[in-house]
Amino acid sequence: MRLKLVPSETSWDFFGKWKLWLGISAVLIVIGFASFLIQGLNYGIDFRGGTTIRTESAQPVDVAAYRAALEPAGLGDVSITEVFDPTFADDQNVAMVRIEAQEGDESVTAETIAAVEAALQTVDPQISFPSVESVGPKVSGELIQTAAIAVILAITAVLIYIWLRFEWQFAVGAVIALVHDVVLTLGIFSELQIKFDLAIIAALLTIVGYSINDTVVVFDRVRENLRKYKTKDLSEVLNLSINETLSRTMMTSVTTLLALIALFVLGGDVIRGFVFAMIWGIIVGTYSSIFVASTILLFLGVKRDWSKKDPNAGGQYANIDA
Amino acid sequence: MLQMSSWQRVMILLTVLVGLALALPNGFYPTVEKHNDAVTALDAGAAATPELTADAAGWPGFLPSGLVNLGLDLRGGAHLLAEVNVEDVYDSRMDGYWPEVRDALRDARDTVGTIRRQNAAPGTLSVKISNPAGMQEAIRLVRELATPVVSLTGAGSNDIEVSGQGDILTVTLSDAERVATDDRTMQQSLEIIRRRVDEAGTREPTIQRQGDRRILIQVPGIGSATELKELIGTTAKLTFHPVITRTTNPNERVSGRQILVPSIDPQEQGTFYILEQTPVVTGEDLANAQPAFDQNGSPSVTFRFDTSGGRKFGIFTSENVGAPFAIVLDNEVISAPVIREAILGGSGQISGNFTVEESTNLAVLLRAGALPAEMTFLEERTVGPELGQDSIDAGKIACIIAFIGVLVFMFFSYGTFGIFANIALIINVGLIFGLLSLIGATLTLPGIAGIVLTIGMAVDANVLVFERIREELKTSKGPARAIELGYEKALSAILDANVTTFIVAVILFVMGSGPVRGFSVTLGLGIMTSVFTAIYVTRLIIVFWFERRRPKQIEV
């Protein structure tokens, strides 16, 4: 007996309700975008400069007392949050203290950090500081720029690759699906105000990679079926291809999610945001490669009959990918 | 038919074996690490103590001993990103030019008249001549001092630019020379930071140039970024200046080419020295420096000049017996002793108000040399070793659980073929570690996440093949043909899917830094190994199995 995520033969109609699916995506994108515009992202120090100090103590964290102790230092906006995690021991109480970048300083000075540490030690003598990170505004500005360039570059590179391997319609479909995934991921980070730092950019790019992976597998089948069934409607071919690859799509998503969920629960709080971004991205990426990319492809239409030379397409290399 | 030539089989098996052998040391991390340290120590000529020999013997020498480096977030340590203020150097370059310019113009006194150095913007040397009519001649003379720039990009241009306006002659560094100078400054700074970090005796530091004027310093095992900053952030610029006078007014106006420097001697609190701006000798003229004790028994640093420094210092002291000179460290006067007699031996002693630790540090800094320019720290991170260990532990557990989950899931989904995929998956993770050790890559926390993600995604290629075999079986072509067709037809999807992800990994590697780069490395390697294991290893296993069993029917 085999475990089957989807029946071995499916002929579900994925395009019957395309208005509904695209509608859901559109609504989610609008919500995400609005949230992004209204409350913005909760940038970590990588992107806006400043210092974070991680504290750890056997004593319970008393946020109010910490805040009171830091008040006299006059450091401007100080945020203190307690961190909870199932991987912590019982006597492990962790908090994150975030200090904004100080006016005129390229990086927070050693004296400021020493003052903060001393102030916290008066509240709780047992406190220790397992990590201290400080990023100057100059670097943080560049980091955000590089990150944005990296995402755009990745999407462009993917666009070009698919264009070369398939047809431009496929490339457009895949890239719209990608942008969809990236926007929805940014949206959920903004909506839930999860800390957005450099590692999240890595997650974002992985989502780009994963989502494209999924889309390409479906498109590969579409390409094959377009040659096989020359008389069938494009929508029929698309539907057939999605059904044929559905079992694989689900298998891969589930194994990847299995691995990521293990990491999410057990991997500790340091990378939880990162793993969350990936889990979300894989769900959204799987969805978009079925519903968004293919629907766009359906709208754009594809040049059929790949075996013959298209008189309109120039050059002998037009069919090089066939 | 389902066939693979013997040489193909041998190559695949060999690759797997080599990969796994390379990964092996990571399973015995502490032992191998001790072994490597001991071997390095012994090679460096350390005495073969019983412990060292035992450590070295702890891991057989014929086995590979490369380890995956653990990143700062896993091992704990400090990370600094420093920007070097390269413009600092232009000033001292101009100071260096002054004597030559002076001598050249002095020889032509008849045409240019008397000369006088003016205060000027940083990086500019400006000279006033009393006879403006001789400006053309003065410019010509100074231009003759210029030397061609020695660099690839600056070939053909001179190192200085000379211009004159009215009675002021201005000398600046040319653009090409500035580029060349910046480059030298960066090289020197890197070298000096490396020496200082090495003197402090930490292991495997990373000291890299980033971009035009930045240096990345990562030192595992150091207590905090502040500590590291004290070590490398001190310029340690030592200079000896003639003293003009002393004052207690911090805003005292000084005439051109003179500087006002505070004293750090507690007995002279509030005292400022007015000094000649051009030093007699500098720390660059030092040949050696050692911590010592002076005649009163308080900590001090003894130093020895190199030959030319000793000569310069000897001439200066013999000409100025009875006058004081100031020892200046990073723009503060440490002491200003009076010259009792000419110091010709080329060695001396700096006594200040040092603790033993300070004098030891100062000696280290003086030996390593002064940084040519000051540095600003743009980014600093400290990770405690416990936090790193916690992350490793959490990552390990997550990896194991993820692994078991995927193995079980694959078995229930594909039965026998699932087991094949699982063997390939285990080999795959082994190969990732093998490759990471081979290229000496650094494993970071996001890197671990990359491996976990690869575990999930690595089965994808196998799933593609297996699903395809299932489909081909439906059209009843017989098992051998179905398997072959399955591989054949799944190949384009596997390649396209993985090439696109690989493109993303490459972009991450090029654009990213630190942990992100660590992630891109594991992701990229994971893609390569998973494609290899899916296309070759699983296939080889299936071929072996098929040849033994010769099944009439298969179920995938």
Image (cartoon, coloured by chain):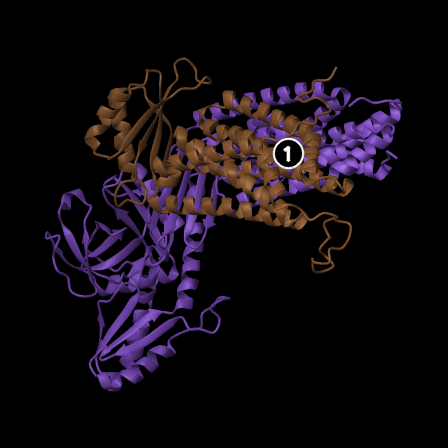
Chain colours: A brown, B purple
Q: Quadrant of residue B223?
A: top left
Q: Where does the image place residue A139, in percent across and percent down from the top left?
A: 38, 45
- In this rendered view, identify the residue nearer to me: A170 or B324: A170
Neighbour class for label 1 at 10 Å: few (<14), some, many (≥20)?
Answer: many
Q: Where does the image place residue B449, in percent across and percent down from the top left?
A: 54, 30
Is residue B244 visible from the viewing direction of this image?
yes
> Is residue B383 placed above or below B44 in the rendered structure?
above
- In this rendered view, identify the residue nearer to me: B485 or B191: B485
Furthest-top residue in view?
Answer: A90
- In this rendered view, identify the residue nearer to me: B465 or B543: B465
Instruction: Give SS at disc 1.
Output: helix
Q: Where does the image place residue B291, in percent across and percent down from the top left?
A: 34, 43
Residue drawn 86% across and 37% down? B6
Q: Which residue matches tag 1?
A: B432
Is residue B57 visible from the viewing direction of this image?
no
Residue drawn 37% across and 72% down? B160
Q: Quadrant of residue A90?
A: top left
Total numbered circles: 1
Q: Where does the image place residue B495, in percent across and percent down from the top left?
A: 69, 41
Q: Is A272 left, or right, of B553 in this rendering?
A: left
Residue drawn 31% across and 26% down? A80
Q: Chain of mark 1?
A: B
Residue type at mark 1: give it. Answer: Ile
